[in-house]
Amino acid sequence: MDIDGRTLVNSTAQEDLKSLYSLDVLRLTDTKEGDQQDVYAEFKEQLMRKPEGCYETRLLWKQNHPELPTNEQVSLQRLNVNLKKVERMDLLQ
């Protein structure tokens, strides 16, 4: 319902929205709380303060994650196409 440019949501609609955004609907599962403590402990362990005063830490990585595929072949193909294009334009020196 829209009144003076404001949208009102009744309690049934609010429950529907909560259900829609719940982890079950998204087919996600919540991790154990202990996992968050492990991540926080790792973050604190790696946190360093630089002489300039700013903080620095490594990126957090998910443990036991499968190796990501490489895009080396696609990149090489793209490079070769661009090199040929530059050669055709007589710009390669």
Image (cartoon, rainbow, N blue to C red):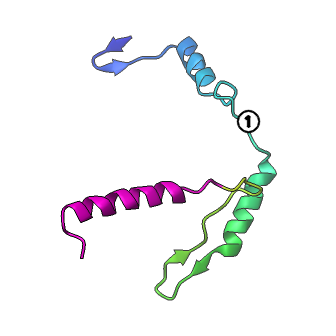
Q: Is residue 74 left or right of residue 79?
A: right
- Residue found at x 59% / y 22%: 20
Q: Which residues are magenta?
A: 68-93
Q: Nearer the viewer, residue 72 or 81?
A: 81
Q: Which of the image's four quarters has the N terminus?
A: top left
List the residue tagged with mark 1: 29
Q: Is residue 32 left or right of residue 22?
A: right
Question: Badge 1: how crowded within 10 Å, few (<14), some, or many (20+)?
Answer: few
Q: Position of residue 71 (x, y in %)?
A: 53, 56
- Residue found at x 42% / y 17%: 8
Q: Amino acid at mark 1?
A: Thr
Q: Position of residue 43 (x, y in %)?
A: 67, 67
Q: Position of residue 86 (x, y in %)?
A: 25, 63
Q: Which of the image's four quarters has the C terminus?
A: bottom left
Q: Is residue 14 left or right of residue 77?
A: right
Q: Position of residue 23 (x, y in %)?
A: 67, 31
Farthest residue toward the left?
Answer: 90
Helix, strand, or loop for circle 1?
A: loop
Magenta: main secondary structure: helix
